[in-house]
Amino acid sequence: MKLSPALASVRVQDGLPMTTPATTWAMLAGELTVRELVTLGDFFVRVPRDAKGRLQSDLRLATIGDLERAMCAGRRVGAGKLREAIELIRVGSASPLETEFRLDATTAGLPEPELDVEIRDEGGRLLGISEVVYRDQRVAVEIEGDHHRTDRAQWHRDIEKYAAYAGIGWEVVRLTSSHIRGSRPRAVAIVGAALRRRGWAPTVAAEPSGVTTRRNRAGDTACRDT
């Protein structure tokens, strides 16, 4: 593939020149769906945590601003998909399953959650870090891979964390891939029921928050389709 230099930011990694994550994301618009572009974008902008749960901003692959600049560097194939995807990308999603749940939930009209949240007690003691949080309803959604079942230490940590959450009045909803991607996905219904139990009521006039609001980006960007 040949590109105008204006469309491709390049950096050297292990002695090899390669496009930056932001440029790679923009270049893939001709091949990926909007949903796939959001999933990839979420991965690139995530701020990793170390083994002790500390954020490591220097290890983030790109910022949302980087993606926007790549998107608007010039005329691109799939520019319309990029513009749609950039509005849905969020900082804090740790896995494709989390992104897929969030997109499904906001499309269904659930409130937009906070991502990668530190839950603390009234004294400020850290009780745990949860992937998807509805703070107003005090509901934490845990999307669990198989290691939560097979890793004994992880299993014990989960039990302790969920007990601590319950102690300060939080409800934990545990989801697996079958709830989100199965033949009969039930994740949105399960979480919606938990939110309603905790006092949330859908607003008929409200549009899905994942489409209409951005909490992690300022301003709007318009680029031309190719």
Image: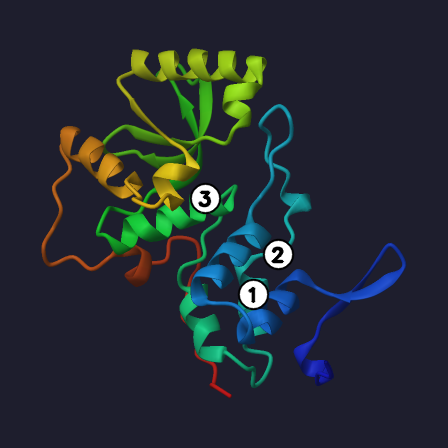
- Residue 221 appears in the picture as rendered: no
Secondary structure type for disc 1? helix
**Mark 1 or 3: the one toward you:** 3
Quadrant for the N terminus in the image? bottom right
Between discs 2 and 1, the one toward the N terminus? 2
Identify the residue at image location x=59%, y=54%. Answer: 44
Is 179 positioned to the left or the right of 225 in the image? left
Residue 138 higher or lower than 9, as above or below: above
Residue that lies at the very extreme toward the front in this rendered image: 183
Quadrant location of residue 169?
Answer: top left
Residue 67 is labelled as 1
Circles 1 and 3: CB atoms closer than 8 Å: no
Residue 217 is labelled as none
Q: Which residue is mark 3?
A: 97
Identify the residue at image location x=28%, y=40%. Answer: 186
Between discs 2 and 3, the one toward the N terminus? 2
Type of amino acid under label 2: Ala
Between discs 1 and 3, the one toward the N terminus? 1
Whole-percent x and y of residue 127? 44, 18
Disc 3: CA contacts within 10 A as few (<14), some (14-19) or many (>=20): some
Circles 2 and 3: CB atoms closer than 8 Å: no
Residue 200 higher or lower than 208, as above or below: above
Whole-percent x and y of residue 27? 61, 73
Disc 2: CA contacts within 10 A as few (<14), some (14-19) or many (>=20): many
**Mark 2 or 3: the one toward you:** 3
Secondary structure type for disc 2? loop
Type of amino acid under label 1: Leu
Type of amino acid under label 3: Leu
Identify the residue at image location x=60%, y=79%. Answer: 73
Q: Which residue is mark 2?
A: 62
The Cα–Cα distance between marks 2 and 3, rounded to whole angstroms, is 20 Å
- Residue 153 appears in the picture as rendered: yes
